[in-house]
Image (cartoon, coloured by chain):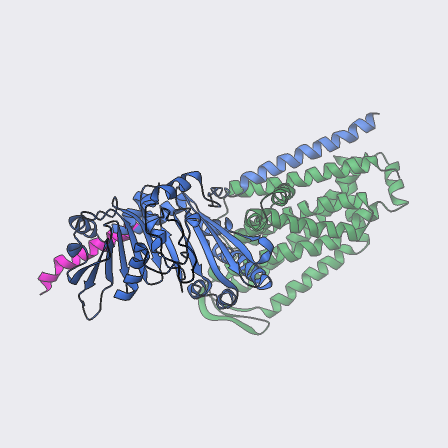
Chain colours: A green, B blue
Amino acid sequence: MRQVWRVGLDLLLEAIRRRWFLALFAFVTLALVLVGQALQVQVVDGAIAGSTLFGEVLFDDIFLADRVLGPVYLATAYLGFFVGIPVLAVACCDFAPELMAPGRIEHLLSLPVARWQVVAGTYLGVVTLAAATTLYASAGLTVLLGLKTGLWNGRLVLASMVGWVGFCALYAPMLAAAIVVRSAALSAATGFVTLVFGVMSSVREQIIPSLEPGLGRFVFRWAVMPFPRLGTLARASAHLASGQTVPADHLGRLVGGALIFSAALLALSAYQFERKDF
Amino acid sequence: MARARRRWLWLVVAAVLLALGAALMLSADPPPPAPIAVVAVPRKITPVEQARNNRRRSWVPTPSPDAGPAPRAPPRPRDPLMAALPSEVKRGAVVVEANAIRNSELGDLLVDCLFAGEENRLPELRDAGLDPLTQVDRLAVADDTLIITGDFSKTRLDEFAGPFAARTDYGPKAELLEPLPKDGRTPPWIGVWDRQMLVFARDAEGLKVVLDRLDGSGPSRPAVLSEDQAWGEIYGVIEGKMLANVLKKDERLRDVIRATASRVELHADVSHDVGLSAEVVGEDPAKTEQLRRALGSALSLARLELQAKGKTDQAQVLEAARVRSAEGGARFKVEAGLPYEFLERVLKQCSEDGRALAARRRADRAGAPDAQ
């Protein structure tokens, strides 16, 4: 396991060397500063009296802060899931192809590291990077809104971690694709396809009636079945953020299923990586 | 060798994990909606229906030819109801096998729904010598004429629909009953034929035309419905323009139907579920194909709308509906089915609503004298 962490750490150091971290964190910070500057909220004893965003009046009545922040958190969680994750996927899509660049891969394989450890380490490095970015963004927004409204809660951070599980499930097929064909573009495309199939698997029972009964319906049902329920996961994340109840058992199964799917794709990547001649 | 074995192990692990993950996520999914029951859609006459049609034939006189030297066709037994139907209709002609429906699995629920709000109606009819649950065989509506077949030998028509202004014999087997105006309106004229058929028409002329056909004295033209088309528990033909008038909501579809469909032949099986088959006949193949597509889209949109509104059971009913092309595009079939469970729910709700209405009426009647 130590070797896996070493490979992962190596990837993180590589990211720092490439100022990748700097760029991503600067981008997140800029977004937070922009929202922080634009959002003007008057706090009156736990209630919010009026708020403007980018000069536009959002509401001018007096509401309980929690009631106002629920929808804000909900929208943020959805935005984070369906915009943040694809952006992060594109940002991370060249790590695996870079790892297998001629010269570097030979050097890596000459070290006392098993091939599967290289795969697992790369995955671990990227998802750690994603966790750090997600935490920074969600914690930053929580602090920002806390300072503005006087209301503090960690729901957005918790929801962002559910979103991060979604990214983990997205990056595993991306890594597998990058091992098959050393292409960052194909890896990113695989991420998008996984996201689409993940959403379709969440709403497959609603989609199925629009397909003619027979082979097409049968193939669709079984093709989307193994994909993580990313649509349901996004909804669970948004509900968590907005303070709605999400049954722990349901959430556990969704998160567990997504992580097992990631592990399965990692095993597939390991199989492919073992077969490759470098 | 060991490396190759380890390689295959990864593949096995991947497959096992994929299956495990899918099973875990499947357990987190909401329970799937109950599968739609397969509803039998009537497609052709069954041997039982053929035997039923044969039993109904009796020696109804054959009408004489309109004109010309053609020899009179040899008399043959005919179904009196079919003989009573006109050769052309403006809106449509539909026959309901009331007795068959009454004795189907839906019969009790239907009767309960029909009479729950009119608790005195059934005893009143029985007092007049007409038990609609046992004595009525078929109902037929052809434009403005209503025909009821059954056993009316003990029915006291004065109590049932009277009193009448006049009762006169008409032909060898029929009687004409002229209604008395009631509340400024003239109720329909009633004709009784052979104590087995009641005919309700808007005026005396309309009634006599029907009775003439039964006595063989009317013009010799084939009826709008033949015995070959008498299958299912509800069957008939509807003119395209009439169908277009029914669709008030969808103006575009209404215009397409008006311009395209000349008539629709429908058959409904009500033996357990309700299976409906409607054959739409057009004149222009291209326009008929356009109508077929428009109907298919309308069904899909309606289903999506119901699904979006959360009315999943109604959406499921529409899911079973099909628009099928047939014979060179000049005609096509629409098939739909209402599962028994769905109808049971709807009819039980109808009965409950009827009983609630009757209870309100009773309460109003009881409260009326106090108020005064």
Residue B96 placed where, x, y %?
Answer: 35, 51
State the quadrant of the N terminus of chain B.
top right
In the rendered view, tell whether residue B76 sits above or below residue A54: above
* Residue farthest to the top, as pictured: B1
Which region is colored magenta?
Answer: B351-372
In the rendered view, tell whether residue A174 sits above or below residue B190: above
x 36%, y 57%: residue: B64
* Residue farthest to the right, as pictured: A103
Q: Is residue A217 left or right of residue B212?
A: right
Number of marks: 0
**Does the segment drawn in magenta span residue B357?**
yes
Pick the residue in front: B311 or A53: B311
State the quadrant of the C terminus of chain B.
bottom left
Pick the residue in front: A213 or B89: B89
Q: Residue A102, can we see it?
A: yes
x 50%, y 57%: residue: B280
In the rendered view, tell whether residue B117 sits above or below residue A221: below
Residue B297 placement: quadrant: bottom right
x 76%, y 43%: residue: A176
Q: Residue A158, can we see it?
A: no
Pick the residue in front: B276 or B214: B214
Residue A247 placed where, x, y %?
Answer: 50, 44
Q: Is residue A192 left or right of residue A239?
A: right
Residue A18 placed where, x, y %?
Answer: 81, 54
* Residue farthest to the front, as pictured: B69
Q: Is residue A133 left or right of residue B166?
A: right
Classified by dominant secondary structure, the portion drawn in magenta counts as: helix
In the rendered view, tell whether residue A140 sits above or below residue B31: below
**Does the segment drawn in magenta span residue B282?**
no
